[in-house]
Amino acid sequence: MSAAAPPLSHRKAPKWLPYLLVSPTLVIVLVFTAWPTVQAVYMSFFRQYLNFAKFRTPTFIGLHNYRELFTSPDFLQVLKNTAIYVAGTVPASIVLAFLFALLVNRAVKGIGLARLGFFYPTILPMVSAATIWMFFFTPDYGLFNSLLETLGYHGPENWLGNPHLALLAVMIVAIWKNAGYLMIFYLAGLQNLPEDVFEAASLDGASWWTQLWKIAFPLLRRTTLFVSTIAIIDAFQVVDHIFVMTQGGPSGASTVLLYYLWQVRFEDQNVGLASALTVVLIVIMLAITITNFVLSEREGA
Amino acid sequence: MNSAKLRKRLTAVSLNALTAVLAAGWATIIVWAVVVSFRPSSEPLGRGDVWFGHALTFANYLKAWSLAPFGIYYRNTIIIVGMILIAQLMTITLAGFAFAHQEFWGKKAIFFFILLQLMIPAAALLVPNFSTIRKLGLFDTTLAVALPYFGSAFGTFLMRQAFLEVPRDLVDAGIMDGCSWWQLLWHIYLPPSVPTLVAFALSSISWHWNEFLWPLVVTLTERSRPLTIGLVRFTQLGEIGARWPLLAAATITVIAPLFLLFLIFQKQFIRSFLHSGLK
Amino acid sequence: MMSLKQRVFSLAVLLLVLGLALAACGSKATSTPAPAATQAPAATEAPAATAAPKPVTIEVYYPVAVDAPIAKILNGYIADFEKANPNITVKPVFSGGYGDVKTTIQTTIEGGGKPPVLAVMLAADLYDLVNAGYVVPLDDFIKAMPNGSAYINDFFPAFMANSRYDGKIWSIPFQRSVVALYYNADLFQQEGIQPPNSWQALAEAAQKLTIPNKRWGIEWPSGWPYWLFQPLAIGSGQNIVKSPTEVVFNDPKVIAAVQYYIDLSHKYQAMPEGVQKNWGNAPADFAKGAAAMIVHSSGSLSGILSQAKFKVGVMAVPGKAPGTYATVTGGGNFYMLKGATPEQQQAAWKFIEFITQPKYAADFSIQTGYIATRKSAYDTDAMKAYIAKVPQAGQLKDMLQYAGAELSCMNLGKVRNIFHKYLQAAYNGQMTPEEAMQKAQQEADKALEMFK
């Protein structure tokens, strides 16, 4: 661990140097993160439709957009879907990632192949992967359904057209895509764990399972925190597969917050409402990342 | 003695089996895509017939390449990813150095301000960023796709972390030797931090190669559209519906280079993640 | 004091920041679209007839919705046109689907940029485009033609149905299709079934031809349901759209159509239940024999013919009453966009005239699978030869007599999404057809309120 840098008593470096060094990054963040946030907040108080001449110039309407949002059953459905989506994909991805890391952390011949098998979804574009998954979800002969049938499943197979299954289908794709990526972080964590801990446990006769849950997982708390931040941000941010597979349907059953935002802005051309949605999304993201940050500070950086 | 050994053996075998099954399952997606891409287009898929056709054919690839200018899409993607990478490597190194090594008024505040970018994902700001790009006159350019990412809070954070891990004595020795700030950066701070740079570079390439929503919004024509958008076009052939062999060939075309690159450099890829101190 | 090296380095970093700004300005200069750049030579009053024609450039946006090499085909036509009109340059932009084209034009105009002169957009988007002030009427150009009304009347009326508004003509048909019922003619003959001529006959045929777990009697995609649903509404006696500001969802005839669709799966077991997300797979399922009939776009014909090993029959969707049939049109028309100079508009109109000539209309249809938009296209030798080889193409054209107007109204995107939401809810059994259509009508009326 390193101590904080002591004050630099350098006659050579000019005082304005640090500001110069951080300026490119600062400018980018200002222009593409800070300023747009302000813009979004501002526009959220206006009514503006781009597809109708009468409403092309913005008119101030106060909190109307927010009122409209929070009384609209569509938006409430979107919130519900988003909550289910996040609560479903994040823990599942993390658990699978941890499991995979454990499985491939063993020195077995050909383990590299397994590692590749779990990780390769990460380097696929989500739109490509989702396109192929569309076939897998085809009723009657899609491979996912064939697999389920051999496992004894006889339920509904219309994954993308069934309002109860559509959201689950996109969640499955997200989990499949992310587990391997998160696995790498756990692998790093596992390899950095002190060897003797496990040796001592084995000598004590602890089973593989006990070692897993009572020892390894708690030691990896910080990794889990880091990984969960990534997973949560990803869950809000990635909607490519929804574009490809369900277009948010049927009847809005698989529409999550970011996809709804895109629809409102680029399909309905409703700039005011889209800005209000942007604000809502920002507030949620801030809440999550600040909570996460506070929690990890408590863990001890 | 023997039963413990036997149990260990059984555990190992069952773990291996589990690993194999899971990995194979995970891999089915790409395996199927490759197989189907060689299936003649005149043989539709159906029950019990979703893998090989009666012949192997390259025709789907030829057709896919004739329907969309993949060469141009490749060019655009490489330009975009390259621009982002070069700019990011520069900005995160410089900024990370400033935050790790130097003291200046407002340092903490500026650092947290930059971290805002981590907390508010680019996707949430699609709408205002789109109008900024419009106002800058950058619509439908590769620069538009790349520009918002030139500064990276994540990268800055990582580099600051990596620089903070450089042993204090080395730095002091450098100062003692009369190094200027950039000599310190180049000779002392950077060398041990290269794995972090590599890990960041790989994850940046991977993320931006596969990005979809932002390019969709700010690009229009072949002038700037990357591979991901070109691929979606195949799924949106509204009038006619899906031709799986054709779609698979288009998909493989988009995936192949990154995939091959990854196969070749797999060890380096993962090692850099492990050693980058991404805790 | 700073060393020379330090100064250089600091300068480099400063340049990085400045470079970003300069690159932005530079891109701004080069990203100005061509029409603006060539505006300089465009004269203000020189009458086109007398002076030597000044060079004009027009940009045309095309969506690509079939897997034919549209770019190659259109570039060929453009080359022919430019040879005949050396002073006009046509710059085509192939940018994606209909949605892409419309979105880009909207955002270009909204951002103060210059839109293209021509664009092919959905015929049904008429009202949104007119109301947003994006497009210009074409009547003056038609009147200036020596045979303007003959020209317009040569287009099939079904295809012109979405071009008229407010007493003016706003678009010219270009790549059009219809909804078709494809059936396995050999199988029908084998089983002794006649091509159905009523709802009842269709249901019974589908039921008879269904073999559980092997073959569906009929597949009827409903992932983007309105288009394939309209023939049922039209065949029931009430189309879902009445005027630019009136939609009809809660009419008993429309509700009966919804119920019929549901009955096909629930009552006759002839169709997959619920929302069928098989627009992509249906043609292949049909060709493979996993479906005896499908309802799909006329544009899928050539794909199906290349895969099916049996005789393919095409017909309009039967109506409720025996002997009646129904279908609906779809596809894109040429629109002329606001903001072009008079010279550009003249050039653009010339281009439209050129590319809609019977021989080009026929050729485009033969190569892409779209239905030729003009009656005289079917008198060309090329088309006659083609129909001799592929009689289904002629049958598709004959279906136009049964076509009703495609759903098109104000605030179309919103209204359509509302309709989809409730139609799919009815298909999925989440509400009764009656309930769903009532709710759909309520919300649609609200969405149309401010446009009345």
Image (cartoon, coloured by chain):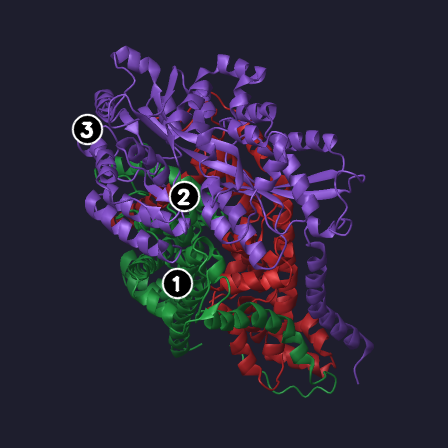
Chain colours: A green, B red, C purple
B238 horizontally vs B209: left or right: left
The residues bearing labels 1 and 2 have C-alpha atoms spaced at a distance of 41 Å
What label sits on residue A232 in the rendered view? 1
Camera-side residue of C208 and A211: C208
Callout 2: SS? loop
The crowding category of the residue bearing disc 3, from other C-alpha atoms within 10 Å (few below 14, some 14 to 19, many at least 20), is: some
What label sits on residue C408 in the rendered view? 2
In this view, the mark in front (2 or 3)? 2
Question: Residue B179: x and y, percent?
Answer: 73, 79
Q: Are marks 2 and 3 on the same chain?
A: yes
Q: Who's the residue at 31% across and 67% down the image?
A: A70
Q: Chain of mark 2?
A: C
Q: Chain of mark 3?
A: C
Q: Chain of mark 1?
A: A
Question: Residue C318: x and y, percent?
Answer: 29, 25
Q: Who's the residue at 63% across and 48% down the image?
A: B76
Q: Are marks 1 and 2 on the same chain?
A: no
Is residue B144 positioned above or below A218 on the image? above
Question: Label 3: which residue?
Answer: C268
What amino acid type is highlighted by mark number 2? Ser
The residues bearing labels 2 and 3 have C-alpha atoms spaced at a distance of 32 Å
The residues bearing labels 3 and 1 have C-alpha atoms spaced at a distance of 46 Å
Asked if residue B251 can be seen in this view, the reply is yes
Callout 1: SS? helix
What amino acid type is highlighted by mark number 1? Ile
Callout 3: SS? loop
